[in-house]
Amino acid sequence: MKEAPKDKNFDHTLKLLKEGYYFIINRRKALNTNIFQTKLIGKKMYCLSGRKQAELFYDNELFKRQGAAPSRVNKTLFGEGGVQGLDEGAHYKRKGMFMELMGNQEMVEISKLIYKYWLAYFDHISNRKNVNMYEASKKVFLQTACEWTGVPLKENESDKRASQLSNLFENAASVGLKHWKSRRERIKAEKWIEELVHDIRNGNFNLDKDKALYKFSWFHDIDGKLLGEKVVAVEILNLLRPMTAVSVWVANIGLAMYQFPEEAKKLQNGEEKKIMMFLQETRRYYPFFPFTVAKVKKDFEYNGFKFKKGTITLLDLYGTNKHPEDWSNPQQFIPERFEHWEQTPFNFIPQGGGSYDFGHRCAGEFVTMAMLKATMDILIKHITYDIPEQSFDFNFNDIPAVPNDGFIINNVRFI
């Protein structure tokens, strides 16, 4: 066995912050390998890219999630004690709690709520007003997520909570004051949900038993005990936060329509198949989160390289979705590639890979597509609008990367 190729120099933390989504891609190309070593925050790490390496990464016999994510990420993006940091039976049991929410009936309900809140939003604004669809989506999606999960929103509370949750994903990778703001908002958000869980368990809050907030509050974990109130809060936020974060894809939809107008024209008749292909290609082509993290579970060998127990490993999500070994013409925006495309758990991973039930692929992918499909239906079938001059530039070292002006529309009119 031999060591994986090494990234030169001592520590590359500053380069990661500078290069963002292209950090692994740049080294994969320079070293001509899909597996290499680097050093970040003073620690040796492996980096993987491509379908075959994604399959390796999601082998639960070789990699684990517990203790892999940096503490600063757990204290902002994920929360502590949530499903992302569990392994084996504990993960399967907790993941099942989420998968029970992912049926067709639940997706139909989410779609109806998206229509409800988008139509209400556009009904209350002036048709001449500039609408930042990225910011508007945060509010609409937060309202949708709260009603779907059973979390009550007080009157005029939507803007506050949408801003609070967006801080968890917009500033999770930040340093300095932005990071500390994200941690502060995480504490406030968890306290908000913890109080609701406490009221439910003490009979002070009546809630539909089919709602996630009720189910999670009375869920018994693998040890047979109820989840702690704080852990329930973390898991409810693992629904509210990513549903709010789908706003990133809405901004990217606007960018795709601007950069590829000929593809956007194909959507004008509202054909569902073409809309779905456009949405999937948007999720493949544009960045969401750059990579995911695990830890080597035991010493093993792969393709002649040795992997050492306990080493943090990064899987390149963005680079895998554009990997030349797995995608033809990966740098081109071609929605039709999804017409006869066969998905595996490892070749298309904008929200993680592996299996939904036994692996770590995000169950929220079903929710994401339901939300985006309904939003596209609104944009195509229910309103007309203009796209004023604006900046669609974004920086690949911003995580998540969103166009500078967030996709602005104006002169909105109902059809």
Image (spheres, rainbow, N blue to C red):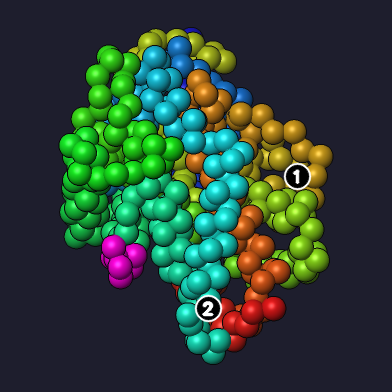
State left or right for residue 298 relative to residue 338: left
Q: Is residue 366 above or below residue 126?
A: above
Residue plotted at (55% across, 70% down): 119
Residue plotted at (30% across, 68% down): 155
Determine the CA span between mark 2 and mark 1.
Answer: 35 Å
Q: Give the magenta part as a residue range.
A: 154-160
- Report x, y in % for residue 268: 77, 68
State left or right for residue 414 relative to residue 18: right
Q: Is residue 51 visible?
A: no
Magenta-span inclusion, residue 256? no
**Picture mark count:** 2
The amino acid type, in three-letter code, at marker 2 is Asp
**Whether label 2 touches label 1, CB < 8 Å:** no
Residue plotted at (66% across, 71% down): 382
Q: Secondary structure at mark 1?
A: helix
- Report x, y in % for residue 103: 57, 35
Q: Is residue 95 above or below residue 9?
A: above
Q: Circle 2 sits on which residue? A: 123
**Mark sitting on residue 338:** 1
**Mark sitting on residue 207:** none
Write down the quadrant of residue 257 in the picture. bottom right
State left or right for residue 231 relative to residue 394: left
